[in-house]
Amino acid sequence: MGKFVSEQLRNVGLIGHGGSGKTSLVEAALFTAGATSRMGAIENGNTITDFDPEEAKRQISINAAIAPAEWNKNKINFLDTPGYADFVGEVISILPVVDSVLVLVDAVAGVEVQTERFWHYADQNKLPRMIFINKMDKENANFKSSLEMAKEVFGDKVTPIQIPIGKESSFQGIVDLVKMKAITETGNKPKEEDIPSDLQESANEYREKLIDAIAEADDELLEKYLEGGDLSEDEIIKGLRYAILNQLVYPVACGSAVKNICVKSLLDAVCDYLPSAADVGEIKGVNPKTEEEETRKPEENEPLSAYVFKTMADPYVGKLSYIRVCSGALNSDSHVYNATTGKKERIGHIFFPKGKEQKDTSHVSAGDFATIPKLAHTSTCDTLCAENKPIKYEDIKFPEPIFSVAVEPKTKGDEEKLSISLSKLAEEDPTLEVRRDSETKQTVASGIGDVHLEVVLAQLHRKFGVEATITAPKIPYRETIKASSKAQGKYKKQTGGRGQYGDVWLEIEPTNSGEGFEFVDKITGGVVPRQYIPAVEKGVIGAMEGGVIAGFPMVDIKATIYDGSFHAVDSSEMAFKIAGSMAFKNAVEKAKPILLEPIMDVEVIVPEDFMGDVIGDLSGKRGKILGMESRGRNQVVKAKVPLAEIAKYATQLRSITHGRGTYGMEFSHYEEVPGEVAEKIIAQSKQSQQE
């Protein structure tokens, strides 16, 4: 692969619902461009961009992958992304570093849930877009209904630049509305000819709409068009490029990826109409030393800057950092400055990635992608740059992980290995969060959904040799009391020699929520010697940590020692610690002990059609609805819901809203568990303690 300047680079992200054909389209494009000698297939597990064993096994994309192809003296970097909701982080990671997106729509199913969601992310990144209606060869494929659905969902800027010739099994090509020529394919050999007579009227109508859209985007072209002059092909191409770059037109092409029909026409359209790396203009960042805004142009004579948008743990070469060179040029055997960490890095080898393949290179131009192995101090979202011209680009905002499981090694003694391996996977995947819960003594992994965490489990085994199991994480319940009480704790033990003796009286009472534990010494007359008082407090704290009614920590209690007795010979710190614990437990049993549960502030964002179902479901989870408000095209439902009821909400919400709903939550406060629910929790806790 030769050297390309930014004007010759097309960095195109493929987005769309799972099964819309993104991976198959990349495969067909690489084959058509001669970048591979055979077309792989999803069902055979041999495609270039789905190279992870887990992808081949599940027949879905899990990771974003880069696949370059040369076409018409340009280099197209295709970035294939997953369409499954659990791997949305991979889609989000590539959007800040591509210059346009190709949105795939299934000609049978039309615009599906994740396509709509990913389009919204492209909106946020202000990316030019082209739509490709795929699977035109399939039974029940319908270009017109898919086009109308795209217009309904994405707006009137959606404008065809191609219309199909034939449909289903008779699909054989397209009418190019710019050239006004029919392009048919037999045996993957495109043939340009006149438009069939039965499509001429339709082609004229669509072309008129296309030229209307292009002319409206450019005052000069509009003036010529209104004066009655037709636009030349060069003027249409120039106007279309401008309209796409400024998101005034979303052009629509069509074809069949699996049958490789019209993929050549698509490659032509990508090079002719989609913006190059040079077209995006200046990239904004911040000087980390002055905190002032700076910009870089995607040109080689600018100071070096590169953005790390993805990190992978490669079993052969170690950690791989995926970068886009934003300005300047990156050379092997050089040194760079990490503006995020403030550390220097040595660049040894540099590779051009093509799926799992890594092709060695010594030079990467502005606007191009590369991978760098074994960077010691660099992670996802870091900026690498020239030390004398530092710049830091904005971090990618990933969705918060909301689905949690407890992870345990199958082999005892592998706890440390499990923790280290999970940490490495979390470094690779910003939507994976790993923590050690000090209360429940569990390692908790949180992700986007159940399939996401299943894949994490598989990666643990394949990459690090750690076999693990997952269970639902324990809910961090608390215990407290509702009334005051007094009780004695007397520990007396005679063993033939020196015995053990400790005797205390405690009064306990509830405090306000959040005030924690308070210990008060009201001993007078030396009935309990001063040196044993701290031991009594330790005994009370120990009893609180282990709970009384269900084994959960106790909170918001004031304990007062006011009486007791001692033995001059047999008393000891240990005896008074045990006596303090006994007195506390005895007092709790008479103080109306209750169970507390964590209550979460929950915010659910859904289309209005699903709002009633979501509110009903939250109410059924013992949730308290606080209110609703509009946010763009969606409705926001705010509620307070017990954590125990919403621990698996990611999967449930997806089912209720057909994947259109999202939510976030954070801890609010603790609240008393209702009687019937508390009885079940206490019974389960006692059973597990016995086991």
Image (spheres, rainbow, N blue to C red):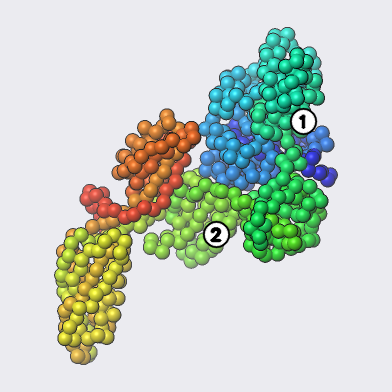
Q: Could you tell me residue 172's position as x and y percent?
A: 71, 19
> Which residue appears at 73% of the width and 8% of the height?
197
Kindly tell me whether residue 416 is visible in this rendering: yes
Give 56 or 8, whichever is nearer the viewer: 8
Q: Could you tell me residue 326's position as x and y percent?
A: 72, 49
> Which residue appears at 36% of the width and 52% of the height?
668
Left or right relative to 140: residue 689:
left
**164 w.r.t. 238: above or below:** above
Kindly tell me whether residue 318 is visible in this rendering: no
Q: Residues within 10 Å of mark 1 (few under 14, many from 20)?
A: some
- Local secondary structure at mark 2: helix
**51 w.r.t. 655: above or below:** below
Distance of label 2 from label 1 (alpha carbons) = 44 Å
> Which residue appears at 48% of the width and 45% of the height?
449
**214 w.r.t. 328: above or below:** above
Q: Could you tell me residue 521's position as x and y percent?
A: 23, 78
Q: Quadrant of residue 167?
A: top right
> Which residue appears at 31% of the width and 55% of the height?
670
- Local secondary structure at mark 1: helix
Label 2 vs 1, first from the N-terminus: 1
Q: Residue furthest top?
A: 197
Residue holding disc 1? 272
| Image quadrant in which the C terminus is located | bottom left
Q: Residues within 10 Å of mark 2 (few under 14, many from 20)?
A: some
Give 409 or 381, whichever is nearer the viewer: 381
In the rendered structure, which amino acid carries the disc numbered 2?
Answer: Ser
Q: Which mark is residue 423?
A: 2
Counting the numbered discs, the total is 2
